[in-house]
Amino acid sequence: RAPQVQGPVDEFYPLGYVPKNKAYAGYQPVAPADFPAPITGGEYHVDPSMVRDRARTTWVVVAAAIWFFVVFVIFCVLLGLIAACQLDASGVRLCDEVKDVSSNAGFYTYDTFQFFVPTVYVCAALTAGALGMFAVCIYAITVVRKPVGTDRMVEIATYIRQGAIAFMLQELIPLSVLVVILFVLAGAGINWRLGGAYAIGALLSYVTGFIGMSIATLGNVRTAAAAENGLGAGLNVAFRSGAVMGLSVVSIGSIGLSATYLLFRDVRALAGFSAGASTIALFARVGGGIYTKAADVGADLVGKVESNIPEDDPRNPATIADNVGDNVGDVAGMGADLFESYVGSIVATSILGSGLPYFTKNPFAMCVYNHLLIDETCGNPENPPLVFSFANSLCQRQLVGTTRLTWEYYPSSVWTESVSMFIALPFMIATVGVLVGILCTLYVHVPAKVSEQKDKGDVMESLLWALRTNVYISSVLIVGAAAGLCWGFFGTSSSFGKQAGFNEANLPVFSLPSGDNPCMPEAGNVEPSFTFTFFGRYAPYDSLGFDYPSADQIPWR
């Protein structure tokens, strides 16, 4: 409030209001309890109809917590049955025989060899997402149970919450029209699996932002009330409220991606899921940001310039709009933006992994790709190498002194030794990320010295270090877990690394001879004089011209 010397705090100027004809020299900090109560006949009265948020529990969230806990238990049982190969569907073993339809010929412009959905690992991500949503509900319940403060605080918080919900619902109308149009275009123009994934991604992106904003608007007033008991208490309420948004992003993202992949069995259709999330993120972030900035500038112009009211003063109605904008732009918009980034990273990695030359039960293709560099080197520019493939010919050649063809020495990889594991890796890293997120958002330790510090910079640094501690712990855990997964999936002791030519150099490999013109055949021959060795590794060269390192480098790379 303003110092007494600038004008008495009385019935004409409650809460330290400074008229235009008096100089304003700044605020003096006081405790909330020291503020004078609104005076009859004064400037402001609390509207009883707006004192709505005094709930200490919410049965909707409690019901959601029970629901997600039951779902988590069911998913754990199903995951165990699938992992033990005890669960079939229509005669297909869910543990290793679910085909990815995106590898069917003609579905997309670029065909791939047949591969399988890594059902076990995708279901693990689905299960972790259910656990994450249970944690989200528990966090929301703990936030709602905190005290809300005075009637004046609740009234302001109610205005902000109503404005934020009104904005989100109003924004939903044009977004729904756009999503329906793009859903039809994607479905009719490409395929309906991609269109369906687009609609699901858009819906879940909006739901994620709305959940985060709903809890944020409930947590705002509770954070302010908790701060009366110390910065540590206020920070924990604020952090727990924000954790709802963060965990909603990773949990709903994991559930949505996993369920969509299991539903459509098309890893390339997940690009539609990411596009749907991007559509909502664009409008939620940009639309909310424009509203936020407009309200912020408007509040400053009206309050500080015209009426000489300090910034963020509750007597300025535009401050309510400014705070509404902060919630819809920086919470809902940011949440949708993070959701898009999160699912986009998983989708991009999975789709790239599905096209790698580590094929399922196709040793001949692996042999050809291991010799494709010869075709690239010796091909006629006017007649591409596929007119006549040296790699194809060499793989069908019977090796001297044996009764076996070259390709028969190459591994016939099962799904745990093929591209399916490259699809599984981002889902498993996401699974670990959800678990680490739950662990590191349980509590923020604020040192006791904060309550004794007087300098604002010292206080801010102490609070930031309290947050950084959790950030550093989670970073170490997730990086360590990611490294462990990479080594466990592709290391020398894994089934992937134990394949012929992957860890040890024991594959038959042909190469071009040295010289100025190695592709020129000798007199009387139709092929060059290839150099043969029985001690080669699998180091494929793909049709796009990428020269892969040998397979033993995969876990490190």
Image: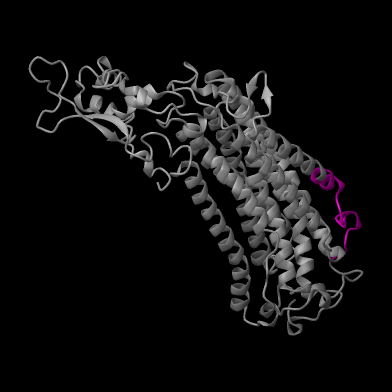
Q: Position of residue 434 (x, y in %)?
A: 63, 49
Q: Position of residue 433 (x, y in %)?
A: 60, 49
Residue at figure coordinates x 68%, y 22% from the top left = 89
Is 64 magenta? The answer is yes
Seen from the viewer's position, the closer of residues 444 and 339 is 444
Res. 337 visible in picture: no
* Residue 206 occupies quadrant: top right
Residue at figure coordinates x 84%, y 74% from the top left = 12
Q: Is residue 197 above or below residue 33?
A: above
Where are the magenta residues, as a range? 44-65
View extreme (front): residue: 401
Q: Position of residue 402 (x, y in %)?
A: 28, 21
Seen from the viewer's position, the closer of residues 461 and 283 is 461
Seen from the viewer's position, the closer of residues 284 and 489 is 489
Residue at figure coordinates x 61%, y 74% from the top left = 462
> Going by the image, does 122 lie left or right of 234?
left
Q: Is residue 527 above or below residue 160?
A: above
